[in-house]
Every structure is written in structure tokens, then in C-alpha cells.
Image (tube, rainbow, N blue to C red):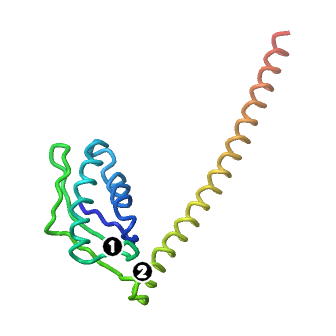
Amino acid sequence: MELRSGYVRASGYANKIRKVLFAITRGRAEPEEVVRAAAELNQYLFGKFQELGVRKEDVVRISIGFSIDGGKIIWDYDSLKIEVYRREEEKNLAQAMEEVEEREKALDEAIKELENLAERLRALSDEISEKVEKLKQEHSGLKLQVER
């Protein structure tokens, strides 16, 4: 398995790592283990960021492989890749942030579409329920007339 952070400001990498890890291990690892493993990786990354001179305003993209053995998350530190886009490298940073914004916009549009579809389904469900109730009432009325 592989964890990929996507583009994120270095100041927010720890939160992003934890969220992504929760998402990709859902049902495969206990929440306590996810928190433990995320903390372990974030501590390791903090040291790497210091070695690389990463500042909190820089943008990073992190990927690392891992496995789950007996419910325990085991990081493959040899597979770690850290891409750094420094603030002064405006062109690369702008390109990275543009990609993030495009993906977020596409996600927002997809969510809106799904919300609209869900609303239409709710309306259809209400309409079906009304028709069922009407049929039940008509059936009950016919039954009463036959009994007379």
C-alpha cells in the first residue's frame, strides 16, 4: 500500500498525513494504530524536513509505502519520496497549488452533483410514498364497500 499526501503546505503536513492514513486504512487497522503510525511517520518527516531545510510556508508532496501486519502499520522508509516546492520557486509553487485548486474545484462540483441527485431521489421517494399511501387508502375503501 502507499500513502500519498498530495500537495500540502509544510505547516499542515501532519494533519494531512493522519487524515489520508485514516482514509486508506479504514476497516484494516484500528483507529489507535492509525494514530500511532501517523505520529511515528510525522516525527520521522519532521526530522527529514529539518535536514532538507523545509520551511512551513513551502509546499510539499509526500509518498511512502507501508504494509499492515497483524493489525500493525509498518512504514517502508526506503520508499519515502518528498517533493519540496519552495516559496521562492514561484513557478513550481504556483503550478502545484493550481493543481490542488483544480482538484478541489472538481471535487466540489462532484459533491454538488451528488447532493442534487440525492435531493431528486428524496423527492422521488416522497412521491412514491404518497402514491403508495393513496393506493392503500383506495384499497381499504374498496374493501369496506365490498364488506357492506
| Residue 27 or residue 101, whichever sits in front | 101
Question: Which quarter of the figure has residue 77?
Answer: bottom left
Residue type pointed to by label 2: Ala
Locate residue 113, reporting x and y percent.
61, 61
Q: Residues within 10 Å of mark 2 (few under 14, many from 20)?
A: some
**1 and 2 marks in contact (CB < 8 Å):** yes
- Identify which residue is drawn at 31% across, 66% down: 4
| Residue 142 or residue 128, whichever sits in front | 128
| Residue 65 or residue 130, whichever sits in front | 65
Locate residue 63, reporting x and y percent.
27, 68
Residue 73 as seen in the image, left or right of residue 98 = left
Residue 104 as seen in the image, left or right of residue 65 = right
Residue type pointed to by label 1: Arg
Report the number of discs. 2
How far is the residue under mark 1 from the one under mark 2? 9 Å
In the rendered image, which residue does mark 2 sit on? 96
The label shown at residue 61 is 1
Quadrant placement of the N terminus? bottom left
Locate residue 121, reporting x and y percent.
65, 49
